[in-house]
Image: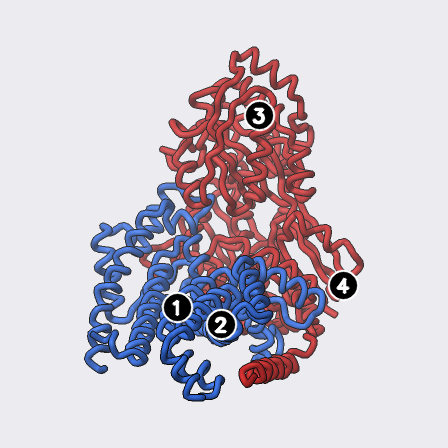
Chain colours: A blue, B red
Amino acid sequence: MGGYILKRLISAIPVLLGITVIVFLIMAMIPGDPATAILGSYATPENVARLNRHLGLDEPLWKQYFIWLGNLLQGDFGRSFALNRPVLDEILDRFSATLILAGTAFVLCSLLGILAGVVSAARQYGLADKAITFVVILGISVPSFFLGMMMILLFAVQLRWFPVSGMYSIWGGGDLPDLIRHLSMPALALSVVATGVIARLSRGAMLEVLRQDFIRTARAKGVHERRVIWGHALRAAMVSIIPVLGIQAGFVLSGAVYIEMVFQWPGVGRMLVDGILKRDILLVQGGVVFIAACYVGFNIIVDVAQAWLDPRIKT
Amino acid sequence: MAFSSLTRRGFGVLTAALLASSALVAPVNAQTPPGVLVVGQIAEPQALDPHAVTAVNDFRILMNIYDGLVRYASGTLEVEPALAESWEISEDGTIYTFALREGVSFHDGSAFDAEAVVWNFERMLNEDHPYHETGPFPLSFFFSAIETVEAVDDLTVRFTLNEPYAPFLSNLAYPTGLIVSPAGVMEHGADFGRNPSGTGAFQFAEWRSNERVVVTRNDEYWDGTAGTEAVIFRPITDANTRVAEMLAGGIDVMVEVPPVAVSQFQGDAHTVHEQAGPHLWFLILNAKEGPFADQRVRQAANYAINKEALVNDVLEGTATIAAGPTPPAFAWAYNEELEPYPYNPDRARELLAEAGADGASLTFYVTEGGSGMLDPIPMGTAIQADLAAVGFDVTIETYEWNTFLGRVNPGLEGKADMAQMAWMTNDPDTLPFLALRTDAFPDAGGFNSGYYSNPEVDALLEAARVETDQDERARLYREMQAIVQEDAPWVFVANWMQNAVTSDAVENFQLEPSFFLLLKDVVKN
């Protein structure tokens, strides 16, 4: 197992290097530069040149890349132009918020999705199956940012059950119940689509497994149905469900961008959108590399988990 | 069947869990406490170092933490004393001597004196200054006319300019002229922007990234203490979310209310404030080539566009119709006699026929949004339709804001016939000087992207810039406005009215023509 993990870790290095090249090139190619964005109406060629010199953007591109990569390898992500503070500080500040939001949404969609999928499969074509399928299709079809806005209007503005936006109360608060109040709506809105996808795929995976001989054997031996479904069948189905969870984790993380916009969640997604609009090159590059590294790391965990469930994969 | 009982139990457990968690979510008391004002901002500030930032959104916080030597008198764009009690201008307009207020100190306890003022301008302008590296200072060119700044004694500062420069005083009233604490910069270096220290009515307390900036009352303030204990600035980027927070009572003041949302605040629980500002929304016309090289065609465009419909229907009354290149908010320099071009499609068709420009095709640059651009896409399509009605064939090209600036600022030649643009300035000199003079063509480093050139206008603008007598300056600007309106290098469309909504717990709130947000006298019940 240790060797397999090491192999996967080494294979991640070229991926991450490739990502640094791609994100650097994209930021270099998009029109507009930070000086123009900062100066706005006052961006005369003279002012732009002066500011670019101050920002170190008058160096040739390849040189800028290697300076950036060299610093990155030493853990120095540089300084954000737009926020006037070290990029890594900003990312770490924001990333914990995103992790809380995306993590909660991911746990929610995994639990609810698998539960719904298993129940659906166990009761194929029954009332529960039809009801779940209906709700799932509805959930997949509604864009999450729209759902978020509607939730704000109903639960925050009309009913006043939840606060509209933010992560903690602006005055007082700051404890766990305060966080949960602020987290409920965005986490739910973020998890809905992924829940639907996971439910549909879990249902399919379970149906596949339930048709297999070992299930019939188990039932014939008189194993309790509960054990058949949750013990034998689900464990076998998990082999095909887990990669889906891995993909959905990425989806939830990227979907967090929209949800963070709607709920003013102080996360890394919002930061990237603002950074792109302001051409805050180092912040965007650093943020993308950081997220990509997390994503790669998560995929390694998924692969390892899969290998652990199904040892044939390791080879 | 065993399984069905299990799922029922499973759902039972789930329901119980949901109920338990909803006990945590007892109805939220969204009201903010008395004495604490919560302001919904449109974005996270960039930094709280006034010399390092350019956005109005940041200025709204900065004006409450810092003072300048001078400031705009309430409700106007005319300067009055602030940290300087008085000043003298030399006969030739090149030496400004300020007498400073005594006994003022920065929030960090260090004293405000002439040396501090000198230090502020040296940091911004002198590349060899030990703290110049705490920049960049993108708007330092506001003060590029300064040759030397020196402390005559503890409370007297003298600026020597390299040539007479009339906008100097109003530039000092701009946030770029606010005075920071030298001790604060020395302590925090490049992080001063997150640890600001000034002399203002509020002092900085806390900044949590993308959540809030908190400032508290400065009990030592030289101009009377503030009406609230603290002000919290919350960045809420999404306009719909900002509206929802205002409706739910999570914020007390909201700036930049989207036009479509204003009607939701018409009840007793809220007050809508409006204030015209020094803003102009216009179309740059390419006077160098193509149909708009002919003055009659440019006038025809001014007649053809229904500005009233744009202002009332697209912008829902959040702007007024512009008559010329200078916004009426510059009351002292504004030419009251100018009437906007009326909406007159017939006159437009006549002019087009005279010029032989019937059916001319135009390329029109439209942006997706940007500083002061209001609702550029709906405005662009409405303008396209108005121009089509008099026989133009208009093709719209849409660009994201920074890309748009990158195409428009270098000049429209060979690319487009017209482009949207908006400017917000602090002196009647700024926009025409940078965007209407012959010497301001893009290749000369200016913003005259439509290549308008009229020697008479050039002479008037240059004379006004060095004129220190305000009445004479005003006369020169009025004359310039009349000529420019007739020449029609732009289509003059709208002057934006800044708006804000306050809850019924807020008193003494007032918007300023400068678009700054001054919160000292506001009371929160």
Disc assigned to residue A121: 2
Q: Secondary structure at mark 3?
A: helix
Query: How far is mark 1 from mark 4, CA to CA?
Result: 51 Å
The answer for which chain carries disc 4 is B
**Count of numbered badges drawn on the protein:** 4
Q: Which is in the foreground here, disc 3 or disc 2?
A: 2
The answer for which chain carries disc 1 is A
Query: How far is mark 2 from mark 1, CA to CA?
Result: 17 Å
Q: Identity of the amino acid at label 1?
A: Val
Q: Identity of the amino acid at label 4?
A: Asp
Q: Secondary structure at mark 1?
A: helix
Q: Which is in the foreground here, disc 1 or disc 4?
A: 1
**Is residue B130 something one can see in this rendering?**
no
Whole-percent x and y of residue B197? 50, 68
Q: Which residue is mark 3?
A: B387
Quick one: A99 or A205, which is closer to the camera?
A: A205
Disc assigned to residue A244: 1
Whole-percent x and y of residue A138? 57, 60
Whole-percent x and y of residue B108? 51, 74
Mark 1 and mark 3 in contact? Answer it, CB < 8 Å: no
Q: Which residue is mark 4?
A: B504
Q: Secondary structure at mark 2?
A: helix
Quick one: B72 or A218, which is closer to the camera?
A: A218
Query: How far is mark 4 from mark 2, CA to CA?
Result: 56 Å
Mark 4 Cα-neighbour bin, 10 Å: few <14, some 14–19, many ≥20: few
Classify the position of the C terminus of chain A by image quarter: bottom left
